[in-house]
Amino acid sequence: MRLKINKYLLFALEFVLFVGLFFVLFNSSVNMTIFPFAFGMLFALLWANQKVWLLVPAYIVAGVLHMPTLNFAICLLVTVFCLIVPFFAHILAKKVMKKWEFVLFSILSQTAVVTFDILGGFSPVLSLVGVLVGVLFMLSCMNIFEAIIIRGFTNKLTTLEIVSLFAIIAVFCGGLVNLDVGTFSFLKLFMSFLLLMFAYCSTPLLTLLVGCIAGVGTLISTNNPIFVAPLVLWALVCLLFKKRQRIFMAVPLVCIEIVIGYYFNLYPSFGIIEILPVLLSVAVFLVLPQKICREVGVIFNLSKGRIAMKNVVNRNREILHKRLGNLSEIFNDMNIIYRQMLKQGMSLPEVQEILFQEISDKICSFCPERNHCHRTHAESTRKVFEDLIKIAYEKGKVTLLDMPSYLTSRCKQTTAILGSVNTLTAQYKKYISMTRDVDTSKLIIADQLLGISKIMGGLSREVEKNVSFDTTRENKILDELTYHNIVCIDAVVFEKDEWTMEVSVVVKNEDAEKMRIADVVSKVCNKKMAIFESFSSSRPGYSVLNLRTAPKYDCFFGISQHTKNGSKVSGDTYSVVKLDGDRLLFAVSDGMGSGESAEDASELSISLVENFYRAGFDNELILSTVNKLLSLHKQEIFSALDICVLDERSGLVDFIKMASPKSYILSEDECKIVETGALPFGIVAECKPLTNKNVVQGKDFVILVSDGVSDSFSSDEELTTCLKSIKTKNPQEFADEFLERALACNNGYAVDDMTVVVVKVLEN
């Protein structure tokens, strides 16, 4: 029961406030001639989702109180009819009334007013001007209600919204100036509080403008400049004595009002009743919670907080630059240490000397013919042992046939010598293999440390420069998006580098998909901008869109595959990855053979390459590391790799090939062939890929294929002729048709796994 009573009291309070608002606007005029503002507020409040069953009675009651005549009552009813009928018609049709519909029905609602004006001898032109002014006032109210009622108090007002707010203040003051009760001025009550709030929560310029605008509003309404000077003086005093403690603003305001009334005699009469409105406003201002002041301050004074925020961002970037630089040096030092820990393998002569000493000590030390062999025939004996060790090292084993006949005829330890040579050589080779694997592992770790050092060094250089924010463009973006009915509560514009500008906007979820956002931002920034990231804002119901300068080129791709006849899975794997710096990576990996083992090999190779590129490692380091890792694998994993990295800013294309087939760049005039080379991944630990750099332009095609496709054609000429003959401009259709023609060369039989990746380059 208590909740119901509270709810009804709230409705009653809203009704009284609406009656008071409409009554003030009914009394606001232009030169006491036309009174066009109340109907505009009525339509604007309904647009802002206020309760129609409260608005309509309040509007009628206020109108009757203002002018209790039959003609005016008819005008009120016509206005209400033109509001209610379309409103409920749209509800039944389950459609939302748009702004232009509100404008149309608001104009129709004034037909009775215009008719009675003309019949009463009033100027038709002035009557129509009144309707036009009322519609403009309605649009101003809609702008403010969208900013405050719909978006909330936590958003900065745009320039257009501030102008609309000033217009409403001027109109409202024009109505209040005509509503004194005796000598008690409601205008003073309202304006003294408003100026204190503006001075405390807003900028000095806005506070002065409010004082001037309010004075001008009273002048336009009454043709009397009596309040222009006092309101401007109030604004100046509030600004001069603005302090953190609100009492230092309130007291001077009361004092200046006393000076204006008693010393300058600007008012017809001045006494305790005349100063009471200012005293009441001051009292309310002093007891107002600080939280409310902060919330109001956000919509006017957000730029100051953002300046501080931007300074903090640049300071944090400076700290991050130093820390990343230090980390880069640490990882580089660790890389040097690991390289110094490598155990270099001994040369073959060193191996021969060590094994010769060990065998001679083990086998010959107790032989009665030792002196004869190692002294009299020392050189020939050493030569025999070195040859045996060399044969065992290269072939893996020596036999009796490898020993010279003169040694077997006089040496009784030939079997022992052969056994020792084979055993010791095998042990050494195993040791060397283990040492090489350990060294390779250390090199991999050293390479990764070097790569991390380079990445951190690059990040350090990237954040070294301060970010330049563009406040002018930020405000313009807010204004333009609001103009296009896109609710944007914040925008940040900054230059990332000399080529790239980035913009972040926070918009309502339902507006996030609108294509116009990119168009508006592009227009304000004077360059093509594209959305590259979108995610939910920390504020419910809003999304953050990040836009960046669009690169010169854009890419579309198509992929077509066919498995080798008789195989269940393809040994070919492809990858398409978006890299930092407006770069795209396209790759095809062909595992040696076909089936599941080939698929595993190609997937492992391309997964490693893809992740290293995403992390930011450079080409040489990536391929060297992946090759070493695969060479250490317990199973033999060999795969051909074809990588294409396209820079969308410049059109530069880097081809990196390891045993992959040739690639092709097809333009309108020619078909370039990108040669191939190098060994497959995983065969040897040290293997340098073949690299090739080219330039592409708009409408060019870049084609990567696996050997199952290239081997289907008898020659490069036949393959390039096939590419030139394909007329479609769609990359997916191009890939499908090219694969079909490759299959047709073998009568539809796939002798190997077949993959085609077609990339089409377009100017942005």
Image (spheres, rainbow, N blue to C red):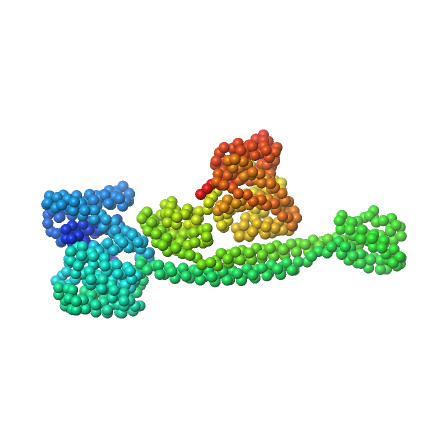
Q: Give above or below for 459 relative to 484.
A: below
* Residue under the image location 58 percent in, 32 percent down: 718
* Residue under the image location 50 percent in, 32 percent down: 727
Compared across the picture, whether 501 is left or right of 143 comes to: right
Badge count: 0
* Residue under the image location 63 percent in, 57 percent down: 442
* Residue under the image location 57 percent in, 55 percent down: 451
Compared across the picture, whether 190 is left or right of 401 comes to: left
| Quarter of the N terminus within the rendering | bottom left
Percent of width and height locating residue 256 = 21, 68
Q: Give above or below for 262 relative to 82.
A: below
Compared across the picture, whether 323 is left or right of 187 comes to: right
Residue sitting at the far top: 747
Percent of width and height locating residue 690 = 61, 45
Q: Is residue 8 visible?
A: no
Q: Is residue 585 visible?
A: yes
Compared across the picture, whether 486 is left or right of 217 comes to: right
Q: Give above or below for 170 relative to 79.
A: below
Q: Give above or below for 6 relative to 680.
A: below
Percent of width and height locating residue 572 = 57, 41
- Residue nearest the viewer, comparing 562 with 690: 690
Percent of width and height locating residue 126 = 16, 47
| Quarter of the C terminus within the rendering | top left
Q: Indicate the quadrant where residue 258 lies.
A: bottom left
